Amino acid sequence: MADSSTAPGNAAPPAPRILRIAVPTPLRRLFDYRPAGQPPVGGWRPGLRVKIPFGRRYLVGIVMECAMQSELPASQLKPITERLDDEPLPADWLWLCQFTARYYQHSLGDTLHHALPGPLRQGRPLEARIRERWQLNHPETAALDVLSRAPRQRELVQLLAQHRHGMITSAITAQGYGRAQLQGLLDKSLVTRVSEPLTASEGWSGALLAEPALPLNREQATALSALHEGLDRFHPCLLHGVTGSGKTEVYLQLIEAVLGQGRQALVLVPEIGLTPQTLSRFRKRFRAPVVALHSGLTDLERLDAWEAARSGRAPIIIGTRSAIFTPLARPGVIIVDEEHDGSFKQQDGLRYHARDLAMARAHREGVPILLGSATPSLESLAQARGGRYRHLRLTQRPSRHAPAKLELVDLRGRPRQGGLIPPVIDAIRQALKAEGQVLVFINRRGFSPSLACHQCGWIAECRHCDSRMTLHRQPPRLVCHHCEHQTPQPDACPSCGSADLRPLGAGTERSEETLATLFPDTPVYRIDRDSTRRKEAFDQLLTEIRRGEPSLLVGTQMLAKGHHLPHVTLVVVVNADAGLYASDFRALEQSAQLLVQVAGRSGRADRAGRVLVQTLHPDDPNLRLLADSGYDALAYQMLEERRLAGLPPYRYLALARFEATREEDARQAAEAAGDAARQWLGERQSAVHCLGPVPAPMERRQNRYHVQLMLSAEKRSALHEASAWLVGWMESAASRRVRWSLDIDPMTLS
């Protein structure tokens, strides 16, 4: 009887002569190489990593296609140097990387490189790191009888007897025991040594929950029921709930249902500062392993979590933006918390949006996706209004207090101390007297946004950017927050020599100093990027705050997003005007979201909250609508304005950026690209509009001049066709003196 694997109808396909490989370069193409060495057991397949010669370097590339012939003669093709894998990278991961490269008009090799953990980019084997666990083979008394002449081994047996599931080597050595004692017990067959993966190795048995789920109110139960209806298919939902309405509890109970089906959950959070809080809550709820993926981990820790998710050992994965590229063995649900947050958009290199990739991934894998926010993006609101997303609402807080309304406080003509006016200072004093905590929100780091000479009007400006230098006091220096250029704080005006230099405006440091002077007996905690640079500093500050003692919290948006601060009863926004009148069309949306989010830190427990918003424009109609009617009313008004103006989400944009050390070079390159694009679009009678070129809102940054060109279309397909053509033109025609990039669906026009 013939072997079916070699029967004529089942003949193995011929071995490929050419491997088309994605290489980590900006070039948007694959490179042909010849196979070499022993082929893998299953033959050459897309997804295998190989080491290849590339110019004078050796790089790690990924096989994307197998072919029988190349456009180049065989004599010009180099052989691969080494095959790194026996099995290909996951197919779902490969699809997502290919989709990302295609949608965002980016090099496939560079996209794959970005999506891989660092050690895999360098050629490390794709396997879990291993640790050893030691367990007793016999009851403690029987083991001790054998060790009458080995006191240290007896002590180690007594230690192991206290741990039913055994102990790992590092935990044993931390107790003062060494390999000699362990080897002695192993030689006597008193212990067993088991190798296990370093991450997500414990699994779980019995009950899934480590603590019971919280009772749901009517709205939460209705939302969860709607989510359960779509567990077996692609089911996009927008969970639109006021701050403190219990969205996380809905996430937890949804994940419980998904894990009960033996599938995995991927949870995206916008910033690393939210990850420890979310991890803590999830690990308290579930016995199942929960792993994290974010930039605060080492490369090997990220690889461990990535591999645990790929293998299916980690049922719950929580991460920031880049975690969207985590492969899942059994995908069950994707959750994007604070979906409106701009941190989900990568602003350089591969300019992807994790929320949008999550939607594409969920659609391809046929799993539900849940977007959660108190202030949904206009894009998500438009999808919900159009019926493409299911719109789930949570309007109630578990506490008896409704979210505090914004109270606008007129700054005009009022004296200020550290940016605060007397009535607001009095309100702070009353809140502290009532044993509450006060959050003073100011979205500016440093002591003062600028330093000026009172004699001649000189203002400290960055010599590398079109921006002012921010004054910092700890230590004293001037810093540009765009290019990080720093100079010492001058003793006298560089222009006229006057010593009368004065800080203009207030930053977090100045507010902290003012509050410490006004309330010397109250702790003041400043939370911004400068005060939390040290590892664990942010968590330590939050631990102090959550003790609940009366205190003053001075923070930027790091503190405004997603944190549960149950003892805060008053929120003060020092200046609400910063983003209201910016040139970017998204500025009002982002400012409103930030104001509502920071206001939501107030009154989350058993006491009502209050929110005071200082402004120089208390009569601004948009600000007044936000204060009187809430975010939803303003958002629907902005949607109508966007529709009339032909802006996202009703049109799609692509932004081409050109930069050069000479202004003329950047401008000429952008003009040439614009002329070529308009000619190409005109020949095809395309509905895509080409706008510009124009200087960027901040034209000079880091000693380079920036010019922009925009493509706009009503249909994504038309925009992508034009974008692909423009990328090809720029690759072939752009001067080497000019850097360029293309941003699909830009979140900012700067």
Image (cartoon, helix red, strand yellow):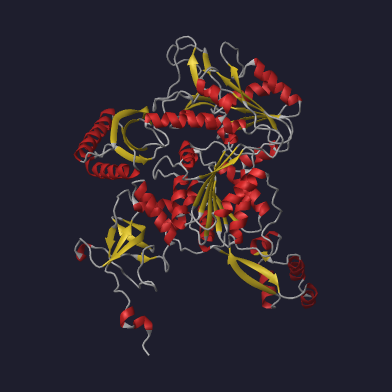
Give the quarter of the image for residue 123.
bottom left
Q: Is residue 112 visible?
A: no
Q: Is residue 425 visible?
A: yes
Which x, y percent locates residue 175? 71, 60
**Which residue is at the front of the view, 534 or 95?**
95
Specify the farthest residue to the front.
Answer: 387
Which x, y percent locates residue 463? 39, 25
Side of 727 where 414 appears, left or right: right
The structure residue drawn at horizontal position 62% and vertical position 47%, both measured from the top left corner, is 222
The structure residue drawn at horizontal position 33% and vertical position 83%, both measured from the top left corner, is 7
Which x, y percent locates residue 233? 50, 56
Reply above or below: 251 against 304.
above
Specify the farthest residue to the bottom.
Answer: 1
**Which residue is at the front of the view, 356 or 456?**
356
Which x, y percent locates residue 424? 65, 19
Quadrant for the C terminus, please: top left
Side of 408 where 172 appears, left or right: right
Q: How many marks?
A: 0
